[in-house]
Image: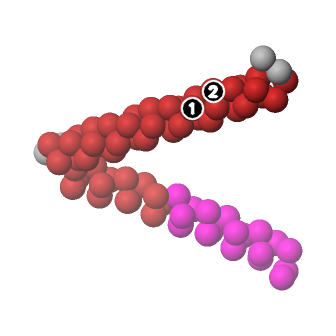
């Protein structure tokens, strides 16, 4: 076996490994998306959880906006 043949075989093995890893990650991603969709569809409190999360995010945005306004007022810009 010469050097070129060995490099070719190594390249084939590396490309096969990359394809296998990609397929495994694709299957894992589909499984995770499916589990998330199943959890969302079967959660009886999904609407309430979403509303609570929205309120929390809104409060955080309002707090951040007020802090920015305070900084603007301090600097006089």
Observer able to see residue 14: no
Q: Quadrant of residue 5?
A: top right
Say if 55 sits above or below 13 in the image.
below
Decide: few, some or many residues near mark 2? Use Cα within 10 Å; few <14, some 14-19, many ≥20: few
Q: Position of residue 77 (x, y in %)?
A: 83, 82
Say if 52 sits above or below 65 in the image.
above
Pointer 2 and pointer 1: residues touching (CB < 8 Å)?
yes
Residue at the spot 73% in from the left edge and 31% down from the top edge = 8
Extent of the magenta region: 60-77
Say if 20 sits above or below 49 in the image.
above
The residue closer to the viewer here, 54 or 13, is 13
Q: Is residue 7 left or right of residue 19?
A: right
Observer able to see residue 11: yes
Identify the residue under disc 2. Answer: 13
Q: Position of residue 55 (x, y in %)?
A: 38, 59
Q: Quadrant of residue 24?
A: top left
Q: Residue furthest top?
A: 1
Say if 73 sits above or below 51 in the image.
below
The residue closer to the viewer here, 21 or 66, is 21
Q: Residue furthest bottom?
A: 77
The residue closer to the viewer here, 35 or 76, is 35
Q: Position of residue 36 (x, y in %)?
A: 30, 42
CA gap between label 2 and label 1 equals 5 Å
Decide: few, some or many residues near mark 1? Use Cα within 10 Å; few <14, some 14-19, many ≥20: few
Q: Is residue 49 left or right of residue 6?
A: left
Number of the label disc, if any, that sits on residue 16: 1
């Amino acid at each position: 076996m010469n050097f070129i043949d060995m490099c070719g075989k190594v390249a084939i093995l590396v490309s096969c490994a990359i394809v296998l890893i990609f397929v495994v990650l694709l299957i894992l991603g589909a499984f995770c998306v499916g589990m998330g969709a199943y959890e969302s569809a079967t959660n009886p409190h999904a609407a309430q959880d979403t509303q609570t999360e929205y309120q929390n995010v809104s409060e955080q945005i309002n707090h951040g906006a007020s802090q920015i306004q305070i900084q603007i007022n301090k600097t006089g810009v």
